[in-house]
Image (spheres, grey):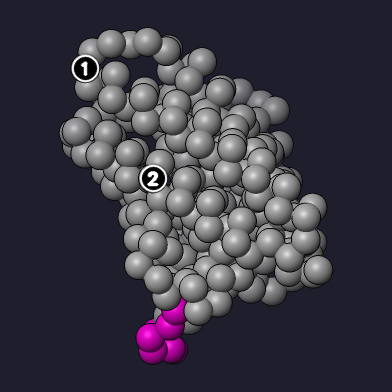
Amino acid sequence: MGPYAVLAVVPLGLAQCGIPRPLSLVNALPLLAAAASFAVEQGWLAALLCAPYCLWAMYLAGTTISRLRARGSHPLHHVAVDAAIFYLAGGAIFLELSRAGLYWPRFTDAVVLMTALHLHYAGFAACVFVALTGSGLGRKAETPLYRFAAWAVIAGTPLMTLGTALTRWLEVAAALLMAVGVTLVSALAMLTARSRGVSLLFSITAAATVLAMAIAGMYALTQVAGAFWLPIPQMAIVHGVANAFGFATIGLVAHWINQRS
């Protein structure tokens, strides 16, 4: 899922959130290098290949900070775009740590990689999806339902990462908050559809989201109860595939088509 995130989901998201020339050669080279890092074993070479991507994502975050200082208040869907860029930078840092083989007791090797992927999909892609949905809703984006769903997605990602480092209870609460937020946003996105084809794509996105978040929510709850009903690798595969393809890819493609219809 790592190469797919940097080669497909990141460009698709950046192309819709105002980043100048997201598919230019300057932007493509770091993405290609990061994907190539998965072709070699963890260590100094993999870390070296992934480093340009990490620096590039941090540069994007830096430009976002400068943009924030230059403007005043702005709509919630703009906040979601800013959050997406920061999560992309965080995901790139964790990806760099993973490819270098660096981890610590609370963050095992598998957890470091899953955190990197989570920041790319549930952080970056989900926040871009929130932003595009809010933009498509227009005045309806001012309703309490959208605002709650948007903030649940925006806040859920860092809370889950913090919970992994501190306490499982916070991790579980954040996972459930994230599940509710992403599910609600996926449902609201269907209201923005301008054609039957886009409506179908958003329906698939919503169904995939319900599946992915239901699995994540049940996994989190059973972890607290001590009932390990689904091993991490199997959970990650099912949850990850539903998120990567059903939600991130189809959802962002649906918004891309919707904007041009």
| Identity of the residue drawn at 50% across and 24% down | 236
Residue 18 place in picture, x, y as percent:
64, 73
Q: Quadrant of the N terminus?
A: top right
The residue drawn where x is 47% and y is 40% is 118
Q: Residue at x 28, y 25 (%)?
A: 221
Residue 218 colored in magenta in the image: no
Determine whether the residue tagged by mark 1 lies in a helix, strand or loop.
helix
Sequence-wise first label, 2 or 1: 2
| Magenta stretch, overall SS | loop
Q: Residue at (39%, 89%) from the top-left corner?
A: 72
What separation in Å lies between label 2 and label 1 (alpha carbons)? 21 Å
Query: Is residue 54 in sight in this rendering?
Result: no
Choose between 194 and 37: the one closer to the eye.
194
Q: Which mark is residue 139?
A: none
Residue 2 falls left or right of residue 36: left
Circle 2: residue type: Val
Residue denoted by label 1: 225
Residue 17: x percent and y percent?
A: 62, 68
Look at mark 2 in the image and give the residue it sits on.
Answer: 180
Quick one: 216 or 109, which is closer to the camera?
A: 216
**Amino acid type, callout 1:** Ala
Q: Could you say whether the residue bearing mark 2 is in a helix, strand or loop?
A: helix
Q: What number of labels is visible?
A: 2
Q: Looking at this view, is 96 or 64 the one in front? A: 64
